[in-house]
Image (cartoon, helix red, strand yellow):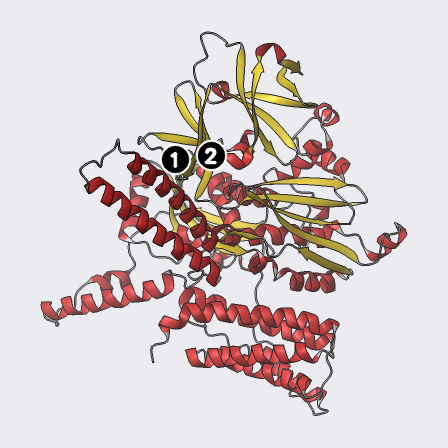
Amino acid sequence: MDVSQYLEIFIDESAEHVQTLSDCIMSLEKEPDNKDTINEIFRAAHSLKGMAGTMGFKRMQHLTHDMENVFQEVRNDTINVDSQMIDLLFKCLDAIDGYLENIKSTSDEGEEDNEVIIKELNNFLARAKGQAPEETKPEETKAESPSDTAGEDHRKYRQTDLTDHERDAVMTAKDSGMHIYGITVVIKKDCLLKAARAFLVFRAVEELGEILVYRPSSQDIEDEKFEFDFSFYVGSQESLERIIDAAKNVSEIEDAVGEELNDFSPKEEEKQETKPAAAEPAVKQEVKKAETKKANTQKKAAVGKPATNRTVRVDIEKLDALMNQVSELIIAKNSLVSISGTEEGGFNNQGFHEQIEYLERITTSLHESVMKVRMVPIESVVNKFPRMIRDLSRTLNKKMELVMTGEDTELDRTVVDQIGDPLQHLLRNSADHGLEDTEVRVQRGKPETGSIFLNAYQEGNNVIIQVGDDGNGIDTEAVKEKAIDRGIITAEQAEAMSQKEIVDLLFLPSFSMAKKITDISGRGVGLDVVKSNIEQLGGDVEVKTKLGVGTTFTVRLPLTLAIIQALMVEVRDEKYAIALGSIANIESVPVTDIKYVEAKEVIHLRGCVIPLIRLDQLLDLPQREEEPENLTVVIVKRGDSQVGLVVDDLMGQQEIVIKSLGKYINGNKLISGATILGDGEVALILDVNTLM
């Protein structure tokens, strides 16, 4: 039986069952005698076991079967629920998650039997029933830490053969007078965003040379398909020590090693493999080559294309609405065809124009329906966090609880898939460094149990996610001192900085509060990566903190990344788009009303002082020959802040499709993309968050 066609459904449903088990086990710890919860756990485990067996994943089936035995005894009141059992069950869920990750990336569960966990399960059952447990053998091999393996054996670039294309690139660089270095970089095991760290290493190294070869491939590194180390060849005129130092200077990098390489010839066995066997006829060789190529292609297809995030479960009402809109669109199209076919039909016909307007309304409505189908609740991301906070509570020996609201708030699927890691990093920071120890909380008159919260809600065309705690807050004086020590700011600059400006220093690349770093997180460690990940989604992050009271991170994200309502504006003869959701209002401001604060232009509008940004100056456009008496100002907002953008003219509101400009404008964050207008002209889209 070919079950590969059911793989995506298996992954989706298994993930649901694992999440159900996690939620129910959490509930069971608080209410050990709740029979409904116990029955729900048993049903989920039983379904998971049956599905794994049907798909042929025997290891996963075996582990789930032994978990089911424990749940069966709990259901029969043979054993009591305790914290030791809960810890063991969560360990099993982590192992099942491991199987699922393997299945997602390779369509296979892998070779890990998890014998130690299975033995622990059986021993727990034996002890609970008053029987003698089996002897648990110690693990034969101890997993090496990155620092243990960062020596000679860890230099993977030396063990990796080059393809012909890679060898040509290396030889071309060497012939041009460059040194060729092989580098292996090891990332710390507690790093949450490995791919982002790797990207920062590449960016630092590419300032000194050109990266020629990636191991694993650059795509695999981007998709985090590597453990905690990666390798590359770099061609450079600089010294090896300088390149190693550049890699090590990136935060959360454990180590970097390398050497200069000179021999790039193929290995003897590689030469022999490429030499055709003389005894075989030419036709037979060609057949063999074709079979090998086909097998490799199938293998790549199975391994290279992750079988995940390909399906979205959709509410039937949303699908009905979508079908109705499509039907209306076909009717409108038929009407147009009918009108254009009559003698009096044509572009000047009133009925023709009415149908065109109707078609526009229907397509807009169709777009909204399609976007609703793409929207999924952020619950799919945040529902793993209560378990994480429970584990941190035990690890850190702090009492804490996570309160979540707005889990049903919906976001575009592409945004939801990428927001999990930044939110997880913020929550870990709150748990480790936000909340004080129990003794300190009692002295301050706070409850013993620290409170961490995650609130999500919709605001206009954005979704707001707040992550925070009622802990110590950020010590801005300590941040200021650290920044001065690092030479980022001078003591004079520090005196003039507001609290917000000081807190924003935490988002600078590689800035960390060294004395606060732990194995779990560090206030400031990785916040630069969190910010860059959120900005890549078109969002932004702000911090509010009060010493002794707590800290709140506010993440603002767009509802969708594909199609937006925008205001089209003109600056000189150039057309630009501004997202309608970012606009508060539009004003005509007399030039005489412009005031100056610290030599910068501002306007006073309805009790607010609003800074002005002249887009012609910012975008390096030619100045006007003559200043008009009144300026057209588009007031844009981000949270509580407002700024006025001075434009030449307004072209009106328009629904635009966002097109990425790829690597063409990597250095300019003011432009978030482009759109193609009705006349075929390209208009750039301004990023209000970066502008502000």
The quarter in which the N terminus is drawn is bottom left
Which is nearer the eye, 181 or 30?
30
Q: Is residue 94 left or right of residue 51?
A: right
- Kindly identify the amino acid type of the residue bearing the numbered disc 1: Thr
* Neighbourhood count class around disc 2 (C-alpha, 10 Å): few under 14, some 14–19, many 20 upward: many
* Whole-percent x, y for residue 674 in the image: 40, 35
Which residue is labeled 1 in the image?
675
Q: Residue at x 80, y 59 (%)?
A: 449
Chain-order first, disc 1 or disc 2: 2
Question: For the residue labelled by badge 1, is the local secondary structure a helix, a strand or a loop?
Answer: strand
- Kindly identify the amino acid type of the residue bearing the numbered disc 2: Ala
* Whole-percent x, y for residue 463 in the image: 58, 46
Please indicate, yes or no, whether residue 215 appears anywhere in the rendered image.
no
Please indicate, yes or no, whether residue 204 appears anywhere in the rendered image.
yes
Residue projecting furthest to the front: 344
The answer to which quarter of the image holds residue 277 is: bottom left
Q: Is residue 407 left or right of residue 538?
A: right
